[in-house]
Amino acid sequence: MKISRGLYILISIAVILIVLYVSNPIPYIDLNKITFIGPAILYVTMLAIAIDMAIASFFKYIGLDIVSSGSLEIVEGSDKSLEFVIKPPRATGILIVKKIYLYSDTGLKISRWRFSREDQRLEVYVSGYPGKHLIEGFELEFETPLSILRIVYKYILAKPVEVKVVPTESRHMFNVEAVVPYLPIVEGRSSRRKGVGSEVISVREFTPHDDYKKIHWKATAKIGKFMVKEYEHRMYRNAFLVISIHYFFYLGDPPPLVFLFKIVIDIVKTLTSRGMRVSLGVITEEDIKIVEFIDRFRVHEVYRVLSDVKWPRDLSATVIRYTSSNRVLRWFIQTVTKDVCRDPCIAILAVDPLDDLDINAVAIVSNFLRSRKHSVKILLTTPSTLRFMYSARVGMENLSEVMGEIARIRRILARFGFGEVYLPTVYLKTGS
């Protein structure tokens, strides 16, 4: 039970008028004619408190019955409602619903709510960030009819409601071709195509995303500008995309997880539109998911898997101090690629190595994949950098995080060298 602000205001006014009545600080004005209002307000307030307290005693009989199903599916950016019936039937005549709080993770929130006295229904609309959320209950704040007292009612669901938020794409933001070049010619089986192989086919002008190792120095000296070699292309029919999601992707507003999902959707849709089949692996702190052989007719599987990524309930400092998603990356890739990539394929690793142990694990995985003739693309998905680049909502309090990520990126680049690791700036389209 809480006291409303209106009660404090009434009592304050009454006390001021009583003080004026007793002290009479202005001798030329007879306050006895007007200061009777103070005691009157005080008496009325005490009577209102007594009435509201008597009404509040009936709140122990108040209850809620959920009408909605045990699960909801929402598209990112929209909301859906959970319906409740307030009982007993006559309770709606004395209830004033002021606030509603949600017992869930930080990725889900109440967008609006509506209370109908006619059918005693309370509709609570929820929206959130992509992924799977669990609603464990609600906290409702009621106000008594005279607005003197507020009663807090905690309602814990017998069975948590599962809410899946399906991510949306944002193809105009990302430059997938910068990460996986030569996509227009991936489809097909010709052995004489420009790409990465052993035989030089032609020479062309240098572009910002080319490897310096491919520079044709004789042609560069002759023409006067950087030229690179075009090799015979090794054809890849399949791709394997793995994303590692640790706790830091759920922090911030908006959380970096939102942009990571959009990058994943864009990569999968781009590859499948070129005729490739994509296997998707998702590693989180609590679960591992994999979908094999997504083609352009099964792109919906990407949305299904991403909407099933569970949000953690607790994101306190003690919980996020240690992350395990990067620790199982090495085992996961070495185990799964034997089945999903029996032939050479494009292996795309969207990772954020947090320490030297993670960096070593990614290096071992990269060497393992290259030894089996796979083309490896390492996408750095540092959370604060993603949020800064795509939303520009990073304050001074996040400056230390961004600087820490820059230091980690330097260590990663020093370990892998140029041309093997792609920074977040590479797959953001300029002018978007």
Image (tube, helix red, strand yellow):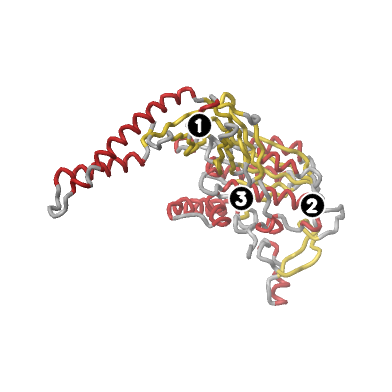
Assess whether mark 3 and mark 1 are in contact (beta carbons under 8 angstroms).
Answer: no
> Is residue 320 shown left or right of residue 287?
left
- Classify 10 Å Cα crowding around label 2: few (below 14), some (14-19), many (20 and above): some
Q: What label does residue 93 carry, if any?
A: 1
Q: What label does residue 259 carry, if any?
A: 3
Residue 91, x across and y down, in percent: 51, 28
Residue 227, x across and y down, in percent: 71, 70
The structure residue drawn at horizontal position 43% and vertical position 55%, both measured from the top left corner, is 396
Q: Which type of secondary structure does the marked residue at label 2 adopt?
A: helix
> Going from the N terminus, do you reach mark 3 or mark 2 first?
3
> Is residue 108 shown left or right of residue 342?
left
Amino acid type at mark 2: Ser
Q: Which residue position is annotated with label 2?
A: 273
Amino acid type at mark 1: Gly
Q: Which type of secondary structure does the marked residue at label 1 adopt?
A: helix
Res 398 seen here:
yes
> Going from the N terminus, do you reach mark 2 or mark 1 first?
1
| Quadrant of the image containing the N terminus | top left
Q: What label does residue 352 carry, if any?
A: none
Q: Nearer the viewer, mark 1 or mark 3?
A: 1
